Amino acid sequence: MLTKDELKDFETKLMTRKEKIEANLDKTSTELDDIRELELNDEADFASISTNTAIDNAILEQQRHELSEIDLALDKIKKGIYGICEMCEEPIGKARLQVKNFARYCIVCREIVEKNKAKDNQ
């Protein structure tokens, strides 16, 4: 089990990352809005901006997903269930939480989830 100090440390890390992502989402959304208002003079400008916009949208989607994972982890801290695997209900290793603060599964269960995802995508 995690100590109160360790939980507080993870909560601080999660909040810091959340604030960083939210700021980035706001900034990127504003930039995308600005791009949409540009008058594009030729197909090369349009192609370049379309490619960049697609990349930005993919990054935004990944960050939105991470943000929802962070919110879930913060909620688990409030409920006193942070650091417990959602599958086997065993504690998630501290080293894993250090690397991925919003981990939902222990290493063994994460591998099972990943294999099932890969199987579903075939």
Image: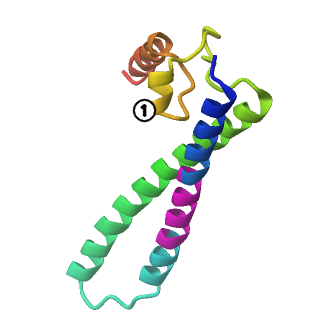
Q: Is residue 94 above or below residue 90?
A: below
Amino acid beneath label 1? Val
| Residue stretch in magenta | 17-28
Q: Within 10 angstroms of label 1, few (less than 14), some, or many (20 or more) residues?
A: few
Q: Which residue is depicted at the point 65% across and 38% down?
A: 8
Quarter of the figure with residue 91? top right
| Residue picked out by circle 1 | 99
Q: Is residue 68 visible?
A: no
The figure's colour scheme reads rainbow
* Residue 62 among magenta residues: no
Q: Identify which residue, 94 or 112, lies in the foreground.
A: 94
Q: Identify which residue, 122 or 17, lies in the foreground.
A: 17
Q: Position of residue 29 (x, y in %)?
A: 52, 70
**Secondary structure category for the residue under label 1:** helix
Quarter of the figure with residue 81? top right
- Provide the major secondary structure of the magenta segment: helix
Q: Is residue 103 above or below residue 68?
A: above
Q: Position of residue 31 (x, y in %)?
A: 45, 77
Farthest residue toward the right?
Answer: 79
Q: Which residue is depicted at the point 25% across and 81% down?
A: 45
Farthest residue toward the left?
Answer: 44
